[in-house]
């Protein structure tokens, strides 16, 4: 791959790199870099006296290892190339943590902050109706992502049920009262913290009092902060869209959990400077593309744990590794979310629900196992954790495709 200019090309460059270690043939690599199906839809949305037409997407990257799985995002910058990248990342994530899913992603190009609740409901119902033939608990299972939440998933499920009958496993991330799973909400952030702990141990660093900096205090950032604090780490800086705070002694996260960082005690700092604070663990948990060749050299962390999807560019990744920073890649670090979705899907299919302690036990054990497998591959091939994670994931998907007979 010569020039990389889109997020999908970036993911595919990583696939190509992993394929070299696996000795895959060029045609197989091409198949792994292609999406199985891409559906683009129009969503007419009524306003006061006219109709606005929105663009919606569902990209199914792979079903080699099971039904496709991936969230649906409402954001004004959603576009087909980004959805392809995120769908492909889901295939690698589900393979890496060894759950029986493939990869998909969906989206609608719209600013959710400008929508009423009724409009959000209308959009997700229309999205579901247009895509009903490609969705289903054994075909493709959506979940929440940026701009959507458990309420959106309840509307999606309700629309799907009207068309296809009762199948609560058709979507995950649902409200607890409506076939959701206890533990799912915290699963991504909890997994991020568990993985940070496992990586610190491998680096011979102490978990207790390890200094943690977190960008973003939404679903991922909040629960990562809470679990890090419960594990004995010191969360010294946190930010969101409205500001950032620093505390040398660490924040009492359990008391601040429902507040915004700007309401935290401590020193106000520039959110742009947060990533450059000296710390043991840096967790970007907001947007993609925040660590680039422009700021990489200024980062002062020992460990970078990618809570967000694609927060680090390829150039920044290289620069950080040269500086000796250990990077735990997104497909491993934030895979607790899809692991939790797998538990919800399993419970829905079995029509049985787990208590939260079982959910947490299973999540912690399986995330620990995934980290250990990636670490082992990194040692075997003498590569960084991102390359190791991709070797493991790409190898599993390629093997499934070959066994199914779709590749020679
Ligand atoms: P969210 O919308 O709940 O929270 C995002 C947070 O980031 C908010 O606090 C927001 O204020 C903050 N933010 C936005 N722009 C910022 C900026 N420029 N500087 C500082 N903070 C900023 O989203 P989320 O569900 O927590 O997802 C965060 C990231 O994690 C996304 O990249 C998402 O794709 C990824 N992710 C989420 C899950 C999940 O289960 N929620 C799973 C895997 C990956």
Image (cartoon, helix red, strand yellow):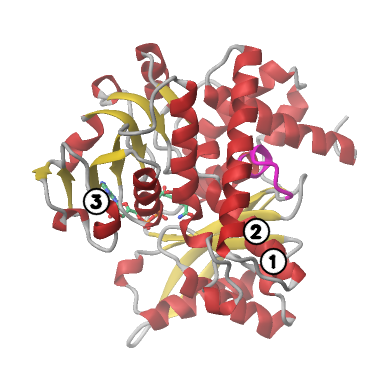
| 257 on left or right of 117 | left
> Spatial distance from mark 1 to mark 3, Cα to Cα?
34 Å
List the residue tagged with mark 2: 343
Quadrant containing the C terminus is top right
Which segment is the magenta one?
93-100
**Are circles 1 and 2 on residues that touch, CB within 8 Å?**
yes
Q: Nearer the viewer, residue 298 or 178?
A: 178
Regarding residue 272, the answer to whether it shows in the image is yes
The residue sitting at the bottom extreme is: 49
Answer with mark 1 or mark 3, whichever residue precedes in sequence: 3
Query: Which numbered disc covers residue 347?
Result: 1
Mark 2: which secondary structure?
helix
Point 34% across, 74% down: residue: 115
Q: Which residue is mark 3?
A: 252
Q: What is the CA distance from the residue labelled 1 to the residue labelled 2? A: 6 Å
Residue for point 23% across, 61% down? 259
């Amino acid at each position: 791959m010569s020039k990389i200019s889109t997020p999908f090309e970036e993911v595919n460059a990583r696939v190509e790199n992993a394929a070299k270690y696996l000795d895959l043939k060029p045609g197989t690599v091409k198949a792994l870099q292609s999406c199985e199906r891409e559906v683009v839809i129009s969503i007419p949305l009524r306003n006061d006296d006219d109709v606005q037409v929105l663009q919606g997407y569902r990209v199914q990257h792979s079903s080699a290892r099971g039904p496709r799985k991936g969230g649906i995002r409402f954001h004004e910058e959603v576009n087909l190339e980004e959805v392809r990248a995120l769908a492909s990342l889901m295939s690698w994530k589900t393979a890496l943590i060894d759950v029986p899913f493939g990869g998909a992603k969906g989206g609608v190009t719209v600013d959710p902050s400008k929508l009423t609740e009724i409009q959000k409901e209308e959009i997700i119902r229309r999205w579901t109706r247009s895509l009903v033939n490609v969705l289903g608990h054994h075909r493709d299972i959506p979940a929440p992502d940026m701009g959507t939440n458990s309420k959106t998933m309840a509307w999606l499920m309700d629309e799907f049920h009207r068309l296809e009958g009762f199948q609560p496993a058709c979507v995950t991330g649902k409200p607890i009262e409506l076939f959701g799973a206890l533990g799912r909400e915290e699963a991504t952030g909890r997994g991020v913290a568990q993985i940070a702990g496992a990586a610190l141990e491998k680096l011979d660093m102490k978990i207790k009092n390890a200094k943690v900096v977190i960008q973003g205090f939404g679903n991922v950032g909040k629960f990562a902060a809470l679990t890090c604090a419960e594990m004995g780490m010191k969360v010294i800086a946190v930010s969101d869209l409205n500001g950032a705070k620093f505390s040398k002694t660490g924040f009492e996260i359990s008391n601040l959990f429902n507040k915004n960082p700007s309401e935290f005690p401590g020193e106000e700092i520039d959110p742009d400077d947060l990533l450059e604070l000296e710390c043991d663990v840096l967790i970007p948990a907001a947007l993609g593309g925040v660590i680039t060749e422009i700021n990489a050299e200024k980062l002062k962390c020992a460990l970078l744990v990618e809570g967000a999807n694609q927060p680090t560019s390829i150039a920044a990744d290289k620069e950080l590794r040269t500086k000796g920073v250990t990077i735990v890649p997104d497909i491993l670090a934030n895979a607790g979310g899809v692991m939790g979705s797998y538990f919800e899907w399993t419970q829905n299919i079995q029509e049985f629900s787990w208590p939260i302690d079982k959910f947490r036990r299973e999540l912690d054990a399986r995330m620990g196992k995934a980290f250990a497998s990636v670490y082992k591959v990194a040692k075997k091939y003498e590569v960084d954790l991102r390359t190791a994670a991709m070797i493991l994931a790409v190898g599993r998907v390629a093997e499934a495709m070959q066994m199914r007979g779709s590749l020679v």
